Image (cartoon, rainbow, N blue to C red):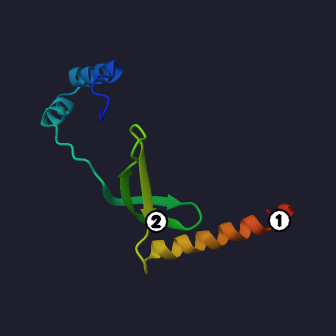
């Protein structure tokens, strides 16, 4: 629920889920939630395939409930090389004649 603890729609949803699922009630009661500021995200790009990106989250000061999320690859990994390949492809596409795109 994050910062919207008083949002009536969210409270209604939690109520509906609680009525319909014993497992949900158990998990909700545990309140086992942690703020994740960094980690790994896995994605699949249609051209270069699977990517494993490190993520870092930063609160944007003065901007209500906004985060800046940075995705990056560790050097000398397959993902790092795939991102370099995408950079080259994007640069080539941008500089190609209009009729070649």
Name the residue beneath numbered marker 1.
Answer: 100
Instruction: Give the label on residue 51, or none.
Output: 2
Q: Which secondary structure lies at badge 2?
A: strand
Query: Would you place residue 86 above or below residue 9 in this image?
Result: below
Looking at the image, which residue sits at the far front?
A: 62
Indicate left or right for 1 with 52 as reference.
Answer: left
Disc with the residue nearer the chain's start (1 vs 2): 2
Which residue is located at x 26 percent, y 25 percent?
14
Q: Residue at x 59, y 65 (%)?
A: 47
Q: Are marks 1 and 2 in contact (CB under 8 Å)?
A: no
For the residues labelled 1 and 2, the Cα–Cα distance comes to 28 Å
Q: Position of residue 4 (x, y in %)?
A: 32, 29
Q: Residue furthest right?
A: 99
Q: Residue at x 43, y 51 (%)?
A: 68
Q: Position of residue 31 (x, y in %)?
A: 16, 37
Q: Quadrant of residue 9?
A: top left
Q: Secondary structure at mark 1?
A: helix
């Amino acid at each position: 629920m994050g910062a919207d603890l008083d949002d009536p729609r969210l409270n209604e949803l939690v109520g509906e889920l609680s009525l319909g699922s014993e497992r949900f009630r158990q998990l909700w009661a545990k309140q086992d939630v942690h703020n994740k500021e960094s980690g790994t995200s896995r994605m699949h790009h249609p051209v270069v395939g699977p990517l494993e990106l490190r993520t870092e989250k930063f609160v944007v000061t003065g901007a209500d409930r906004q985060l800046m999320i940075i995705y990056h690859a560790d050097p000398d990994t397959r993902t790092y090389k795939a991102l370099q390949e995408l950079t080259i492809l994007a640069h080539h596409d941008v500089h190609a004649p209009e009729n070649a795109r």
